[in-house]
Image (cartoon, coloured by chain):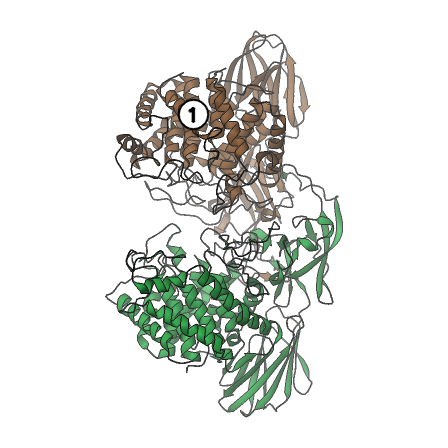
Chain colours: A green, B brown
Amino acid sequence: MNKPAPVQPVRGALRPLGLDETRLTGGYWGRRQRVNAETTIRHCLHWLEELGWLDNFDKAAAGAPFERSGREFSDSEIYKLAEAMAWEIGRTGSDELEARFTRLTERVAAAQRPDGYLSTMFGSPGQRPRYCDLEWGHELYCFGHLIQAAVARLRTRGEDGFVRVARRVADHVCDTFGPGGIERICGHAEIEVALAEFARATGERRYLDQAKLFIDRHGRHTLAEGGFGRHYYQDDVPIREVEVLRGHAVRAFYLASGAVDVAVDTGDEELLEALRRQWDRTLARRTHITGGLGSQYTDEAIGEDFALPPDRAYSESCASVAAVMAAWRLLLATGDVSYADMIERSVWNVLAGAVDPGGEAFFYANPLHQRTADPDPVAGEVSHRAAGGRRAPWFDVSCCPTNLARTFASLAAYVATVDDGGLQLHQYMPANVSTRLPGGPIEVSVATEYPDDGAVAVTVDRNEAGPWTLRLRVPAWAEGATLTDPDGRTRPVAPGRADLTRDFAAGDTVRLDLPVAPRWSRPDPRIDAVRGCAAVERGPVVMCAESVDLPGGAGIADLSVDTGRAPAERDGAVAVAGHVHRRPDTWPYRASPGPERDREAAEIPLIPFHLRDTRGPAAMRVWLPAE
Amino acid sequence: MNKPAPVQPVRGALRPLGLDETRLTGGYWGRRQRVNAETTIRHCLHWLEELGWLDNFDKAAAGAPFERSGREFSDSEIYKLAEAMAWEIGRTGSDELEARFTRLTERVAAAQRPDGYLSTMFGSPGQRPRYCDLEWGHELYCFGHLIQAAVARLRTRGEDGFVRVARRVADHVCDTFGPGGIERICGHAEIEVALAEFARATGERRYLDQAKLFIDRHGRHTLAEGGFGRHYYQDDVPIREVEVLRGHAVRAFYLASGAVDVAVDTGDEELLEALRRQWDRTLARRTHITGGLGSQYTDEAIGEDFALPPDRAYSESCASVAAVMAAWRLLLATGDVSYADMIERSVWNVLAGAVDPGGEAFFYANPLHQRTADPDPVAGEVSHRAAGGRRAPWFDVSCCPTNLARTFASLAAYVATVDDGGLQLHQYMPANVSTRLPGGPIEVSVATEYPDDGAVAVTVDRNEAGPWTLRLRVPAWAEGATLTDPDGRTRPVAPGRADLTRDFAAGDTVRLDLPVAPRWSRPDPRIDAVRGCAAVERGPVVMCAESVDLPGGAGIADLSVDTGRAPAERDGAVAVAGHVHRRPDTWPYRASPGPERDREAAEIPLIPFHLRDTRGPAAMRVWLPAE
């Protein structure tokens, strides 16, 4: 049961594959994964040392009062990076990373207290006492990330020093927060999803019970109201009564992920149904076209129904990491491919762009409209600007780099699943799948340049399982897709899933053709902030206009587009027809919107949103005013 | 030169009148002024006592270390309230208020240090030293409000204990921040406008010189960058090089006000021109239809060009107080009536609504779109929510109640001006004006129910000045206005100003008829957040829809309106034709915006925006999606 994969429910419609069963073999994500391994992980280690966030552990271990570096949750960055390293060691067996991991384990372990408690922020001489500030202290949040790293470690290398630290932490949490203990929650959800998975990885039922306790305690007002209100940390309403995800976006989706785990492993259908309803309404009313989540800067929160301003979209990188976590768990539980659609949307439009192609600069937030061309960040300087602007090497609140690193390192886990009837492919990237069906082993390889090209060739390289069903996801936007079977027969397939059942012979190739030509998308009329606009999507990839491509020095506010004409594509370059306008500056509210005489026809080039801000300072917009 | 009026430049196109020359005689603003005097001032005093913000002065005077209440700028609330009381005492001669003012003066004076320094936040035993945190300490900001109150006092009652306190503060500031002293600025502009006016009121040139020093120091990076960047406190760019107002909205307009004063009194035409350009561009690109300013919650800032989201409009009440201050100064300097248009817009749409009709509840921010019907605030509880929601009795940052109180108490000052050629009427409300032109005294009375009705009757009750020109502002929206002279001859007048020159006889009545029928207004196409929408304005009053008026339980997100049909008005009630929609919840971005079959025709009642949230919980919107 302990495959090297982040999520392994005890039951569900689909079963995950291990990272030893699915491997990326190249293409865009193969490259990104290599950059992550070779550059990003090292970059993060450098900053954690540079800023003293790792030193905090040495100082806490020493026992004397010390000046601590970083915010109250900085321990978690070490743990998220440890998780990234663990997956990466599992993937490549890197001795160098293993040596670093061992050293890191020693430093973390040295700071653990005899009763299992482990924090560089609380409880040491001169510090505030443990658990004096559950609202903002982030102790259990940090523990959760430590435990998730231990899950990765246990499933890739087995029991070791790091895992032992995590076991003692988890036991301490159960002892302290179990029935009759501190019957409260942590202000930042994370311990729930971590304990639930640790229960799976260790077989310790008490961890699942504790996760369930925390889940059920949300909404019981065990936290103080605080400046942002209890909905901020999902303590306003019990989870079963919630209608739509709300409050701090990362917290909301971490909590939902843990709740799915608990619902599945305890067989709680009512809770699972509630979570599905919440998910559906969140997607219908509170999600950006990029899959991005969160519209409020002040509290990094999801915001109200239909409040989805592209310029002030918060769309935190970590919120999309969290949404992928939740979507994957719902997909495994239900088999509903729409969850995989959301994973694809998040991966291509938020995660892909959140890390610079070079792997050393990050977007904390991912707004869909950048009004000004901001200057380059100062090299080597920590950014205090969480929102918009340019990618930065590090932040004072630097949750995204390590979160992205652990996700990229384990990305292959989200490509495919199995059930008793066969194999399901969810994400299309060059990959090999080698697994076992009830009838015997199979091997499948995927060759594709998707989403640049819509052709996905799936070749069965080995089949000792007899007849089984190959199920291919057809994204919701893919009207007009076709499936070609190994005999060369082509048939149309509707959005949803395309099944082909066969006793495959080695070398049999199934081809899915997805219509990735660029297309116009219009928003629900209730989304005020983008009314009267259209966006171009190309397959799963949301496109944007950047000011550096505009004709004649036009500004990003001066565009309009002709949505009556299909977006054009030539040699992979996408453009739309429209106009650039010159408008006078007067009092801007008048009986008529003003003459449109002073405009010039223009062809407006578009690039993938995830490639924005890779060519120097630029203003940018996804939503284009329609003529 | 010391008329009882807040602003008295040494030169300019127009001359202000004193509050002894212009009096409101009834109508809407007469009532509001009475409620302000009888209720709001007392309400503010109650809270200042209740929360210990006044006690801080007693404790600071006592000299022992003490636990201080309130935020770092709470002293300023006492001073703003003192200013409101001073204007009110000047207006009504209330003995009761005078007794309160005297007692307050004693408590403030007792806390002043021998060298003139006066703060309950810094410099006392156990407190941080003076001026250790110019970025956030607000010491000079508080001094500024103290000095403005002293201006009011000096001009209504003459030299007294309060004025003496202010003189010593102002001298201390000049001694400390003059050439060779601390050559920096305060993080919150206010001292500039205060010192400039105090120079006028006292005849002390050094106060003007010091104001000019502070103005010129802005943009010289004498403050640390800070979390919001230097533009937040207008320390990014020297004021003459600024293109558009930016950063914290209240700071920006207080600074602009002081800069106009300095430009006018020093004859600095270049600076005045720069400020006019900044103003014009700010209005064209960064101002809500209500006149509200500020689109960013996080830093209460103005935001970027065309970033004007109605739902996340910050539009702080104090920013409109500050904008009225700046507009009035620009109007006096230039005579350009468009500044009076902006005053009217701000007064009717922000200030009027910022205080509950009962005078005891306030909006800190004034967004134009309230998505949810929020519950009543808890009675007697300080609100921590600066933005949106419901009016609250007090805030932890409670700058608006006292700021509105001082503005309401002195509102008559903004009604009329004179120049050598005659009298100019800028704001239309029932009022008497009794002043002196070069040729002799005149008396004029204004009778009107504007803006409910468009007729403004101006009667010359006395004229011993010979021939002079009555100039009436014709608002920019008032296409089709007419002027009827005392002989009953009616002529059309274009937006701008309507002049009538005559040797008026006592009893002569001039009538201005403004077309106040409700009309559609459309936004500049560059304002993304309200694209495809229209708003209704009725005269200067912006209208809104509230959910309590919608047919069949429709939500505020479910409306659309037919802008091809003029808004209807019957017995003062305004309504527009449109539809309410029922739309399914699906993934909201699709090839077509979805069918519009499931809709019903509806008549949608509108109320003045300033009357929102006076009938219980309601969602609300100004901008209505156009069909």
Rendered position, B159 above or below A283: above
Residue A6 visible: no
Q: Identify which residue is drawn at 29% across, 67% down.
A: A113
Count of marks overlaid on the render: 1
Q: Please provide percent x and percent y for residue A248.
A: 44, 57
**Toward the viewer: B626 or B78?**
B78
Residue type for callout 1: Ala
Q: Please provide percent x and percent y for residue A600.
A: 76, 49
Rendered position, A549 above or below B164: below
Q: Chain of mark 1?
A: B
Q: Tell me the residue that label 1 is attached to.
A: B170
Q: Residues within 10 Å of mark 1 (few under 14, many from 20)?
A: many
Which quarter of the picture shows residue B121? top left
Q: Identify which residue is drawn at 37% across, 80% down.
A: A159
For this orientation, the residue located farthest to the left is: A180
**Toward the viewer: A34 or A551?**
A34
Q: Please provide percent x and percent y for residue A156.
A: 44, 79
- Tell me the quarter of the image containing the N terminus of chain A: bottom left
**Toward the viewer: A201 or A503?**
A201
Q: Please provide percent x and percent y for residue B129.
A: 36, 37
Q: Secondary structure at mark 1?
A: helix
Which quarter of the picture shows residue B266? top right
Which quarter of the picture shows residue B85? top left
In this image, B307 relative to A454: left or right? left
Residue B400 visible: yes
**Toward the viewer: A108 or A425?**
A108
Rendered position, A19 above or below B113: below
